[in-house]
Image (tube, helix red, strand yellow):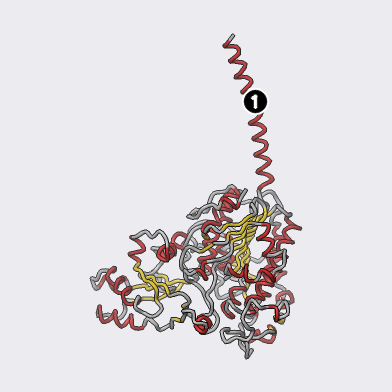
Amino acid sequence: MKFSKFICLLLFLGVFSCKNNSEYSTSITLGQSTSQPKLVVGVVVDQMRFDYLNRYKNKFTSNGFSRLINQGYSCNNHHFNFIPTYTGPGHASIFTGTTPSVHGIIGNSWYDKETGSTVYCTTDKAYTPVGATAKYGQVSPRNMKVTTLADQNRLFTQMKGKTIGVSIKDRGAVFPSGHTANGAYWFEGLSEAKWMTSSYYMDTLPQWVQDFNAPTKISSYLQTWNTLYDISLYDESGPDLSDYEEGFKGKLTTEFPYDLSALMELNEGYDIIKSTPFGNTMITDFALSAIEAEGLGADDYTDFLTISYSSTDYIGHNFGVNSVEIQDAYLRLDLELERLLNYLDANVGAGKYTLFLTSDHGAADVPSFLTDIHIPSGYVPQNSFTSLYTNLKKKYGVSDLIKKISNNQVFLNQDRIAGLKVNLEDVQKFVVNQIISYPHVKKAYTATTMQTRYFKDGVEKMLQNGYNQKLSGDVLFTLESGVISYGPKGTTHGSGYNYDTHVPLLFFGNGIHPGKTYERTSVTDIAPTISALLGIAFPSGTTGNVIEEVIY
């Protein structure tokens, strides 16, 4: 009797278990099919500091940046965790989830120790320009040594999910879209005025790109740049007439308006579009054309679109972070984001796409401006290290121990040092002891230190994350806060200070849990977070962490 009751109990539990497993399996299957975004859009705003979100928020519409913030998830203490904070390394790190120490993009350009020449980050002479005859048209992502988010999605979907990369800059299109992209496109201005690509991706431009390149289409962006609103409303910025701005050649003052058609001849032809908000308008137009022509988000396989809004960087370099020009650029970019989101809602479907927005780096206030208001700042002239060559010659008796000083790194002639039977680390230490005494140099470290010690935090950790044993120099140094190696007008970036590292990170759309955090997050956390959302493998070199609060 007891035995038969036991058998009945087992049968009951088996039926119950099967029923529930069946329902659970069905719910999981349905959940997977409905929760996967049809399209992931990765937006990078070149040179966007985090504080712009707060500085200009009262002038933004409710449907651009504000919509992303209010309906999405905002990481308000988001930073780059490496030096140097440049465009190439920034874009590569966002989409690989790791730092230059792993992915190998240590600068926009760097000194190649093997060839003794300077290498541009995307240059690959195995390929040729397609669509234009650009100076830097021999391009591929091969210098980036690991996979990206988009690569992993392509692998996961058996190459059925598409990837398209769009930017005015080649490095802003190539690195985000990865090694397996269906297409990466950038703009060649000068006298050509064409969107182009590389034979790495294809042999001829698709018809939709050729159509976009119609002369009348590109010329339409040569407008007169005036402020979007009455200039008296731009009280979040400094005066329009400023001694801290470079401006355009052919115009005596840096004041609105700017007639681009009249100024283009003295300002690299059609390249002048890049340095105005109309460059970002062109990027949006091109991206929307890509979505339509490539059918992005139109089937059951998740596609990727990467968009890098580059014009904000050109404008920031030219006019500085406190200019009316940079504010106007962001007020207009806010409208571009609204237009992008509206198009995605209408054509992919509201709630059927996921978008994240961040930046590749920030920027410093113009040092001459900081000096005038008594904030420590300054400039490092190009000839600052002349005495280093002289003192090395006095010490070792030869004049060719330095091959190159590039990206705040000193590359030594290691073969020459070996021939002198001198210890390499001793020479490295000598260089460190020399340059640490120079004006405006904050810290200096040998490559040996980077290789043999582990730093947990601070600028030392950031240098270590940016140090690549195979590619980087023998000595690394940093400058003091507010100090740049640049001209007296306009500004730049590249340091480990907050003005260069603190950038926005906004998540929005399918699978995103609305909210915000002030916990510190890093650029390397973006890729694993989106990977977790999609349920795909992390990019091969990922060192960041999933921001769990972001996703459902």
Q: Is residue 216 left or right of residue 152?
A: right
Front-lying residue, 480 or 431? 480
Instruction: Indicate whether 22 appears above or below 391.
Output: above
Residue 455 x, y percent position in the rendering: 38, 60
* Residue at the extreme left of the image, as rendered: 421
Residue 33 makes an appearance in the image:
yes
The kind of residue on which mark 1 rests is Phe
**Quadrant in which the N terminus appears:** top right
Q: Position of residue 523 (x, y in %)?
A: 53, 60
Residue drawn 59% across and 69% down? 51
- Relative image position of residue 551 (x, y in whole percent): 61, 50
Q: Secondary structure at mark 1?
A: helix
| Residue furthest to the right | 346
Residue 421 or 71: which is nearer the viewer? Answer: 71
Q: Quadrant of residue 438?
A: bottom left
Q: Which residue is mark 1?
A: 16
